[in-house]
Image (cartoon, grey):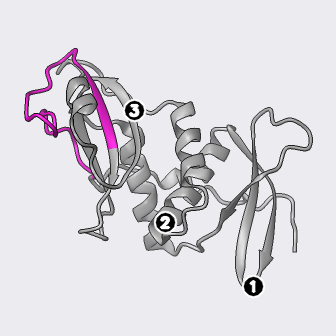
Amino acid sequence: MIRNSPYDLDPMSRISTTWDIGRSSGHCAATGSPLSPGDACIVALVEREDDLSAPLARVDFSESGWASGPRPKGVIAFWKTTVPEASEKRRGFVDDQTLLDLFERLGGDERPHRVRFRFVLMLLLVRKKLLRVVGTASAEGVERWSVLPRGAAEGEVPAEVVNPKLDERAMAEVTEQLGEVLDGAW
């Protein structure tokens, strides 16, 4: 069964930041040294296997700590940013290309929380018009959405995204988690 536009609802309007995946500790996770305003740092989004109710956490590193120390287990994304001044207006620190890279990286990963996260991330990317839904198909009880990036060449093979059929609670959890990442809560 294929249909053209399954994007009827706007679950991304539910993004909020009430589920805390972590604010900066203000210290480098590798060295323990303080991260001061103006310092460049690396923020890693890390999968936590010890707490499935909050499977993602934020871990901050100084540039030297990231370069010299062992990386944390379960890193699914990381990016470079600058520690803001206390008076600086809060801004999102994940740009569009980082979101697209994260979407690509999560492809093929069948762990349930990553499938859910990728699906909601795909909805956000569709909303931002960075991806477009070109169809859906169902086989053996699994619905897959086909998406292409903005400006895709004719004949480009779409990425397939499993629709995890999130209930209201699961959708809220994942969108809040994604919202926290996008908000850049320092």
Q: Residues within 10 Å of mark 1 (few under 14, many from 20)?
A: few
Give whichever of discs 2 and 1 has the lower sequence position.
1
Q: Nearer the viewer, residue 69 or 46?
A: 69
Q: Which residue is mark 3?
A: 79
Instruction: Using the numbered discs, state the Cα–Cα distance from disc 2 to disc 3 in whole angstroms.
Output: 25 Å
Instruction: Using the numbered discs, state the Cα–Cα distance from disc 2 to disc 1 in whole angstroms.
Output: 23 Å
In the picture as drawn, the residue positioned furthest to the right comes out as 154
- Residue 38 falls in image quadrant: top left
Q: Which residue is mark 1?
A: 140
Q: Position of residue 90 (x, y in %)?
A: 31, 27
Q: Position of residue 6 (x, y in %)?
A: 76, 62
- Residue 66 falls in image quadrant: top left
Going by the numbered disc 1, the residue's amino acid type is Glu
Give whichever of discs 2 and 3 has the lower sequence position.
3
Q: Which residue is mark 2?
A: 171
Residue 169 position (above or below residue 125) = below
Q: 48 left or right of 170?
A: left
Magenta region includes residue 24: yes
Residue 35 position (above or below residue 22) = above
Q: Which residue shows up at 45% across the image and 67% down it?
A: 113
Q: Position of residue 156 (x, y in %)?
A: 85, 43
* Residue range corresponding to the magenta coloring: 21-44
